Image: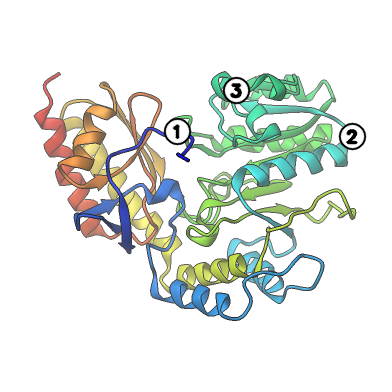
Amino acid sequence: MKLFDVYPLFNIAITRGKGCHVWDDKGQEYLDLYGGHAVISIGHAHPHYVEAVSRQVGTLGFYSNSVINPLQQQLAQRLGKACGYDDYQLFLINSGAEANENALKLASFHTGRKRILSAEKAFHGRTSLAVEVTNNPKIIAPVNANGHVTYLPLNDLPAWEAELAKGDVCAVILECIQGVGGIRMVTSEFAQGLQAACKKYGTVLICDEIQCGYGRSGKFFAHQWLGIRPDMITMAKGIANGFPMGGVLFSPEFVPVYGQLGTTFGGNHLACAAALAVLDVMEEEKLVENADKIGNYLMAELKKMQAEVPHIVDVRGRGLMIGIELDIPHKSVREPLIYDEHIFTGCSGTNMLRLLPPLCLTKADADEFLTKLKKELNSLVA
């Protein structure tokens, strides 16, 4: 049997990691500014994380959600305090797509409606409803194209208000920093106006914090920069530092009904142990603050570089979620960064480098990247 070939792969096999660095099977070290697609929040193989997960697997790795799991209760309490939503309710599942799926489903149950508003260039996942609210026809199968979703321009408040005024929208789903869409930023004016319109017309506001949340923006959630408080918040990626986990925060107005939502593996003992260890490290090492500090430094230096070297069109983002828009294909820079300079970055579209490093990134790591990026850009003749 062979693998179903769905990913174009770099010819590199990563076998171990530590902090913001990984090594391949030949012993070559790489600076990881990709974080496994924003998943590695506290760094690779953090000793506290390794110890906590190892201890848990040695006692109880899994039991069903038909019995009390004290780790789930601990996680809900810790997470509520860490993010400032201690009056909300937590539902634990396995992934970001599943988080969005359940949020949209409950919004429909709550309102009795079935239409959804989503942003142009949005990405919310690859499962049924999650892919339908993703603005990419190439990945929406015919079975998923049910006509539930209207896509609207980001930050165009009158367009969103006009659709909400029709009174048939169950949910608005929004990334406050679009990731796959190219690090496009939601404005405070738009976010606050959208929240007011959702309240006016009885529509559930869902903030998708799967990539931009969990400390990455320099606040716990990216929407906290915008002065809004959504009805639901979806999260995954950094929540358990690589252990598959997702979650939805529901505001107090939502009342659970047995049978509407459920999960086999969600919130299992190992996942909760991993997530609790992540919160321990984030708090002890002040990683949210570090994301803000190092992110501000990187943004400032990249903007200086924009005026000094060829090919940088724009730099945008917040915290350690940064997009570097180029006037050439990103592979012209990304591939030499990986193969020659031994630095992993992400990408978006055809011409953007996307930085999503672990939140423990240091100034020295940032300076290494800046030096090598400048070298590669200067080596390219327009």
- Mark 1 Cα within 10 Å, few/some/many (few <14, many 20+)? few
- Mark 3 Cα within 10 Å, few/some/many (few <14, many 20+)? few
N-terminal of the two: label 1 or label 2? 1
N-terminal of the two: label 3 or label 1? 1
Residue 376, given in percent of the width and then of the height, sits at 14, 35
- The amino acid type of the residue labelled 3 equals Asp
Along the line of sight, which residue is nearer the eye, 194 or 48? 48
Q: Is residue 359 above or below residue 370?
A: below
Where disc 1 sits, the SS reads loop
Along the line of sight, which residue is nearer the eye, 196 or 344? 344
Residue at mark 3:
156
In front: label 3 or label 1: 1
The circle on residue 81 is: none
Q: Measure the alpha-carbon separation of dots 3 and 1.
A: 39 Å
Q: Are marks 2 and 3 in contact (CB under 8 Å)?
A: no
Q: Are marks 1 and 2 in contact (CB under 8 Å)?
A: no
Residue at mark 1:
5
- The amino acid type of the residue labelled 1 equals Asp
Where disc 2 sits, the SS reads loop
| Residue at 64% across, 38% down | 192
Horizontal side, residue 121 vs residue 159: left or right: left
Along the line of sight, which residue is nearer the eye, 285 or 8? 8
Horizontal side, residue 132 vs residue 112: left or right: left
Q: Measure the alpha-carbon separation of dots 2 and 3.
A: 26 Å
Q: Are marks 3 and 1 in contact (CB under 8 Å)?
A: no
Residue 299, given in percent of the width and then of the height, sits at 31, 44
- Mark 2 Cα within 10 Å, few/some/many (few <14, many 20+)? few
In front: label 1 or label 2: 1
Residue at mark 2:
112
| Residue at 32% across, 61% down | 16
In front: label 2 or label 3: 2
